Amino acid sequence: MANTASAKKMVRKIERRTAVNKARRSRVRTFLRKVEEAIASGDKGAADAAFKAAQPELHRAVTKGVFHKTTVARKLSRLSARIKGLAA
């Protein structure tokens, strides 16, 4: 248990930051799910549109420190390859 003023303040700050990061992570997962669903349905146009919407969200998560840059790069690369593999 935090017993100094600075430690108590850090606990409060960490709680706020955790809530913000959780919301950001959830938002990114929603965008990724939309891309996955479009790929699963086989609709290349919808998959492209969802992918283009997801890209800036993923990059924003990197700048905010929610995800590591290589993790996002890997996810985008794999999604892009799967979309490219869909029949036009």
Image (spheres, helix red, strand yellow):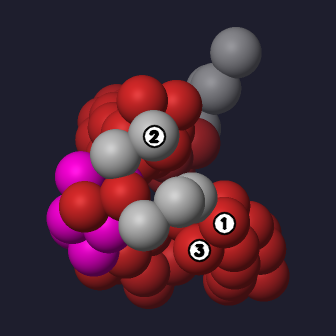
* Measured Cα–Cα span from mark 1 to mark 3: 4 Å
Location of residue 69 by image quarter:
bottom right
Name the residue carrying label 3.
84
Segment colored magenta: 46-54
Name the residue carrying label 1.
85
Packing grade of label 2 (10 A; few <14, some 14-19, many >=20) is some
Task: Using residue 81 as the reference point, say whether residue 14 is left or right of it.
Answer: left
Q: Nearer the viewer, residue 31 or 24?
A: 31
Type of amino acid under label 2? Gly
Position of residue 45 relative to residue 22, above or below, is below
Which quadrant holds the N terminus? top right
* Magenta-colored segment: predominant secondary structure: helix
Mark drawn on residue 42: 2
Location of residue 65 by image quarter:
bottom right
Type of amino acid under label 3? Lys
Task: Using residue 32 as the reference point, say whether residue 66 is left or right of it.
Answer: right
Packing grade of label 3 (10 A; few <14, some 14-19, many >=20) is few
* Label 2 element class: loop
Residue 29 point in image, percent of width and height: 45, 38
Residue 16 point in image, percent of width and height: 31, 38
Residue 44 point in image, percent of width and height: 37, 58
* Label 3 element class: helix
* Measured Cα–Cα span from mark 2 to mark 1: 10 Å
Q: Residue visible at 64% across and 26% down?
A: 2
